Amino acid sequence: MTALATLPLAFSGLALLSLSMDRHVRQAMARQHQARRPGGWALLALSLAAALLSDNWRFGLVEWTGIIAAAAALVVLMLTYRPRALSAAAAVGTVLGLIGWAYVGLS
Amino acid sequence: MPHSDPLYSHHQKNIANHSQLRLVHSVMNGIVHGRDRRQTGGRWQRIVALCARIAAASVGGYGLAAASAAFLARALPMSRVEAATAATLIAFLAMPAAAVWAFAASTAPRALGGVVMMTVVLGAAAWLLGPRP
Amino acid sequence: MTGLHTWSGLVIGWLLFAITLTGTAAVFSSEISAWMQPEVAGRGEPRQAIEKAVAWLRQTQPHARGWFLAADERIATVHALYEDRTAPRGYRTASFDAITDTPVARPTMGGQFFYRFHFELMLPNPWGRILTSAAAMVMLIAIVSGIIIHKRIFADFFTLRPTGGQRGWLDAHNVFGVLALPFHLMITFTGIVPLFKTTLPWGIVANYGADNATALAEFYPGLPRRGPSGTPGTLADIGPMLAEAERYFGGGRIGRVNIAAPGDAASIVTIMRNDGDQLAYMAQALRFDGMTGKLIGAHTEDRPARKTFDVLYGLHIARFAPDVSRWLYFVCGLALAGVIATGLNLWLKAREPNKGFGHWLVARLNVGTVVGLPIAMLGFLWANRLLPATYLERSAAEVSIFFWIWAACSLYALLRAPRRAWGELAIVAALAAGLLPFVSLALTGRGLWHAMDGDRLFLGFDLVLFALAALAAVIARKAFATSGPIRLARKQEAAA
């Protein structure tokens, strides 16, 4: 169940990356922050780390490429239908991801 | 029509008058728009040119893959079975490469000629190497 | 390059949609097979199921040239395949679990039908495989050319503007394509690679010529080969061989068991490791002498190029995938089907004001394939429930019904205006998916409502069917909303 960590972290990372783009920050009616782009990449790296630290890193890596697609799809859906909630969702995702990390017992 | 294509005019505005940039620009332009820069002439010539490109991408692409597989299977510095396997995996990539070349090359003769030449060279090399002991 | 992408995509679009959708369904072929054989509940241990299967085969098929048993990765059912010249395809299957002595399961191809259709279209060998490989290669070309022409690939990464016009469809096509791009590239390339012996054997030919025996021996070293001797012999007890295999696999599971020439003194038992244990396909194999049960050969693949090939094969058939990964494969497969369907629709939208014969034909082929194929797949499941379990040739009949339904939907789509056909066929699909759980419950006694007793397979299956019904209903609503009086009113508004 590594997805409990990888999916929320990937979602938050991609959400931040999308919000670092002018087009989408306007959609979300939010302000621009310089920390968003590095923050987004950091969360993505954390998500990948969770995948590689799982029981079987090979299976984990394969699963992670699919998790990224699923997380990106969620970001796209939010941007299309609930753009203003995206920043908050990114924060929630980060917390859920860290909880998931602890729950799955990754080191 | 390139000049009314909004993507094309975007390119024109942003290209600096720098010779290297212009070269990269014209190559990318050629890849995206795939137009025969030196093609003149009527309908039949355009049809023949298109058929040549399609042939280069399909039949030519397969021939290139076959020749690549044979050449690499004999040339790669591994055991017979390993080389044959690696050669097959790599050779499959020759087909999309040939297809992209077939439609990105600036003229149809270059498209077909390029693929045929590579196929002949690799095939000859494979034949010259001879079967492995 | 745009032309290359558009035309290569169009020419093989319908075939690729069929290959993609059936392949996506095949992710769950184990569950589909289990659903289609409700008499077998997959109880007990696979090893005991194998022993039951071999015992039955000893009794009933002693003179077959070979018995081929496959232990399912997820459900403790073993499917045995044996030669039978009276059968339409030359072989029959029988399914066993640990408590089945005589197979009672209705004969059916099960989920394997979607798998087989996916890679050989039920055409004779090698034509089906050549056709699907060619289509996959064109798909690879379409994907690569699509990447080249998508200039704003990063800027547009998260962009979806569902306006209903051409831009909206292009956004959808791009989103389905780009978000799961690693999957699409991987699944296409890994789909082409395994069929190389049919499609690109020249590497083998260059190194081995026509000497297939040596090639086979070098590809799978350590596994002795011998033909039948002609003298009859009795097959040893299979249990100890299975136990030794499990010890050799270090706690790994048994996957396939092939018994060559079972009634002969020179019989050979090959036991292969379960594909669910690792990424690589057929990672380990053992050979036993059939009469004595002694181990005569073993092979674990660790050569780099061979292992790469096995991993690529394994990535495609995804037997390794645990639960989350399987659903991701399924969802990404649906996304790929979405790429193709939106692409086919885009071709129409881009030509909209000038509608020639091409537009007429493509619009109708689109409906017939994108809605007709799912209806046919559901029809295959309906046939499984409606045909009598004792009808001997029901397996072939289920397949025929699939094709007849697809043909009927395509004909309907050809004769009906596309806007109406989309809505009407989507309603048929919604009903076919939505009513199936009830019909199945009535005819088999197993269903969603028994999930409390631990029958989770039907729970999952019925829920997916309801979800598909909902999707079809949404599509029907959208199709009817943009046709008829509303559309006419909008046209009048636009003209005013």
Image (cartoon, coloured by chain):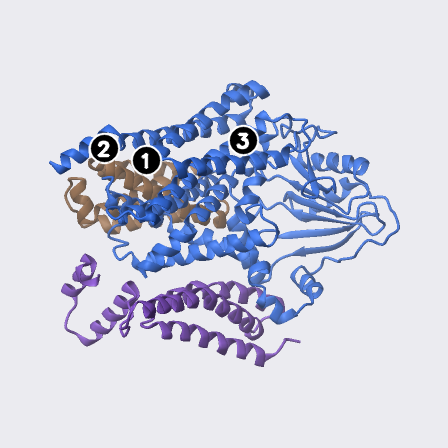
Q: Are marks 1 and 2 in contact (CB under 8 Å)?
A: yes
Q: Residue furthest left?
A: C496
Q: Amino acid at mark 3?
A: Leu
Q: Which residue is mark 2?
A: C487
Query: Mark 1 packing: few (<14 Cα in 10 Å), some, or many (20+)?
Result: many
Position of C239 with respect to C404 (left or right) is right
Report the chain shown in purple. Answer: B
* Same chain, labels 2 and 3: yes
Q: Which mark is residue C381?
A: 3
Q: Which residue is mark 1?
A: C419
| Residue C458 vertical placement versus C293 (above, below) | above
**Residue lying at 46% horizontally and 42% vertically, measured from the top left:** C21
Place of residue C307 in the rendered image (x, y in percent of width and height, measured from the top left) = 57, 58
SS category of the residue bearing label 2: helix
Place of residue B85 in the rendered image (x, y in percent of width and height, measured from the top left) = 57, 64
Query: Mark 3 packing: few (<14 Cα in 10 Å), some, or many (20+)?
Result: many
Report the chain shown in blue. Answer: C
